[in-house]
Amino acid sequence: DRFKPDKKEHYGITVLFVGRPIHIKGKHIIEAVEKRLFHIKDVRFIYVENVPYEDLPNYYQMADICVVPSLYSEGISRVVLEAAASGCAVITSNKGALPELMNGFGIAIEPDITTIANYINGAHEQPEKIKKARQHARLYAERFFTAKNAETILKEYE
């Protein structure tokens, strides 16, 4: 219930990075993508680091796309779950558990500047596709990222 889409419609594409500003999290990749796409005036980038947990839903609600460009074998990412529940289209790297987590609602790609820039540019050129991806992410989260699912998993490990 905390992470849910905002009903407001807005103009353009907002890309979100949530994470620690360390090399293996890939923030520098998104910054390079931003520089590459600087000429597209209605694409904006938001970087979230070290904010209180209760403030995170506001950032996800402002975003259309959340990018998790990890450069290492990341496990299950809370950012991915929160972004999907908030109705963001999600792009992750193809490292660790992230591709399996994307099975069904997002995409896992090579974490490089060109690939991510091309995806974001495509989203800008075809806003109906990103709107559909956002809706799909939320529906997937409602189905699979619930307290009931967590309880089922915990019972299996008792």
Image: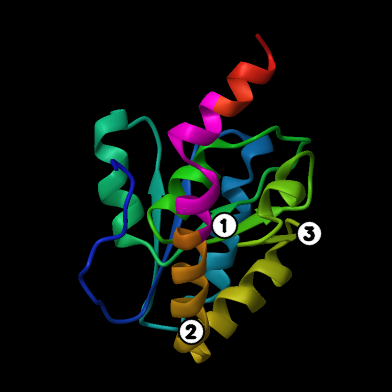
Residue drawn at the location 66% of the way across and 61% of the way down: 104
Q: Seen in the image, is 101 located left or right of residue 80?
A: right
Residue 149 part of the magenta segment: yes
List x then y, in percent, for residue 34. 51, 66
Residue tagged 1: 30
Q: Amino acid at mark 3?
A: Glu
Task: Name the residue furthest top.
Answer: 158
Main SS of the magenta segment?
helix
Residue tagged 2: 124
Task: Name the residue furthest left.
Answer: 8
List x then y, in percent, for residue 120. 56, 75
User: Badges 2 and 3: C-beta atoms under 8 Å apart?
Assistant: no
Q: Earlier in the sequence, mark 2 or mark 3?
A: 3
Q: Amino acid at mark 1?
A: Ile
Within the image, what quadrant is residue 77 found in? top right
Q: Earlier in the sequence, mark 2 or mark 1?
A: 1
Q: Seen in the image, is 97 located left or right of residue 88?
A: right
**Which-is-in-front pick, marks 2 and 1?**
2
Q: Secondary structure at mark 2?
A: helix
Pick the front one: 66 or 20: 66
Where is the N terminus found, in terms of image quarters? top left
Residue tagged 3: 110
